[in-house]
Amino acid sequence: MSSTWHILGAGSLGSLWACRLARAGKPVRLVLRDKARLQAYEAAGGLTLVEQGKAQLQAIPAQLADDNTPIHRLLVACKAYDAEQAVAQLAPRLARDAELILLQNGLGSQEAVANRVPHARCVFASSTEGAFREQDWQVNFAGHGFNWLGDPANPGPPGWLEDLSDAGIPHQWTPDILTRLWRKLALNCAINPLTVLHDCRNGGLQAHHCEVATLCAELAELLQYCGQPEAAEGLNEEVERVIHATAANYSSMYQDVRHGRRTEIHYLLGHACRTASRHGRQLPHLERLYRRLVEHLNTRGLPSD
Ligand code: NAP
């Protein structure tokens, strides 16, 4: 089995993983969106990782989806709303033993991808690493965070975890990846939409304790009845801790809206509301929050799906 890492999406996280794997001597190929992006990438000469003020260029080869080499290992590093379509384009190239690692935030996109490629193993990831791009083909990384990896369909760890250790990518294999993803989703639902609607930094929510607590109670109820009681434990306390610890930060959703970028709302608050309705449950505050956020996005001309 080929050990090449194909990386779909050379955005912030995709570039961060690609640079660290390439730096450790692992074979890496970027899969870019179209000819124009490939030309722009080739003109730049590679990806640059900026860490602790030091920039390092990695001349990682890149290709398009219609290249004809088979893919055994694919890191899917698109946004949640792009993942299914982007993977579908690569489906004909996936080998019988193909393994996909899905880096998407929220829930819903992983299932959509897995249904598109039923013969492939899909490993879900939950990442707290933070990377951002100041310009194309250059990623800045503060060096903090962690990656949880797991496969709800198969608890056995894959052999390539060693590559991550060699590349210094902090990670742990867990049989409870869905619990991790649900917990992160709940934290996001309790904080990010309110920062958009109150137009504030995370710390601004300290003035809205009651609203936050009401949302946490509904989220905890949702987690209980969708089989994730561990993800519900001490949710309100952790949300308050995060608000306090990140008081000076703007949430990712706040920044997306501010810059006129599409958000991943459909896979976060949207997924929570859809799951509640599938269970025939009413979560009035969460549903109202979702309606207000959709309206807010629509008035700014941003998609809400
Ligand atoms: P990003 O910077 O916007 O990168 C996404 C990349 O996917 C873009 O470069 C985009 O290409 C590419 N793409 C989309 N469709 C494609 C296609 N069909 N073929 C090839 N490339 C395609 O996003 P990100 O911040 O890395 O986030 C990726 C996921 O990780 C999200 O779900 C996010 O929530 C999650 N996450 C991110 C961070 C972080 O710090 N950034 C942390 C934790 C989790 P173009 O450049 O051509 O548009």
Image (cartoon, rainbow, N blue to C red):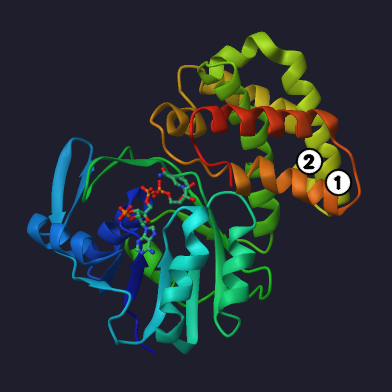
Say how many tags the image has: 2
Q: Secondary structure at mark 2?
A: helix
Q: Amino acid at mark 2?
A: Ala
Q: Picture coordinates of residue 114 (x, y %)?
A: 60, 72
Q: Image quarter for residue 20?
A: bottom left
Q: Image quarter for residue 47?
A: bottom left
Identity of the residue drawn at 34% across and 81% down: 3
List the residue tagged with mark 1: 224
Please say if 174 is above or below 146. Answer: below
Mark linked to residue 242: none
Task: State which tag comes first along the sequence, 1 or 2.
Answer: 1
Q: Picture coordinates of residue 190 (x, y %)?
A: 68, 30
Crowdedness of circle 1 by 10 Å Cα count: few (<14), some, many (20+)? some
Q: CA distance from mark 1 to mark 2?
A: 7 Å
Asked whether residue 229 appears in the rendered view, the answer is: no
Which one is nearer the viewer's eye here, 23 or 261? 261
Q: Secondary structure at mark 1?
A: helix
Specify whether tag 1 is near ligand 1 (CB below 8 Å): no
Left or right: 168 as drawn, with respect to 120? left
Q: Amino acid at mark 1?
A: Gln
Left or right: 47 as drawn, with respect to 158? left
Asked whether residue 184 appears in the rendered view, the answer is: yes
Left or right: 140 as drawn, with respect to 252? left
List the residue tagged with mark 2: 232
Quick one: which residue is furthest to the top in this view?
207
Q: Picture coordinates of residue 45 (x, y %)?
A: 9, 59
Please say if 57 is above or below 223. Answer: below
Q: Picture coordinates of residue 275 (x, y %)?
A: 78, 51
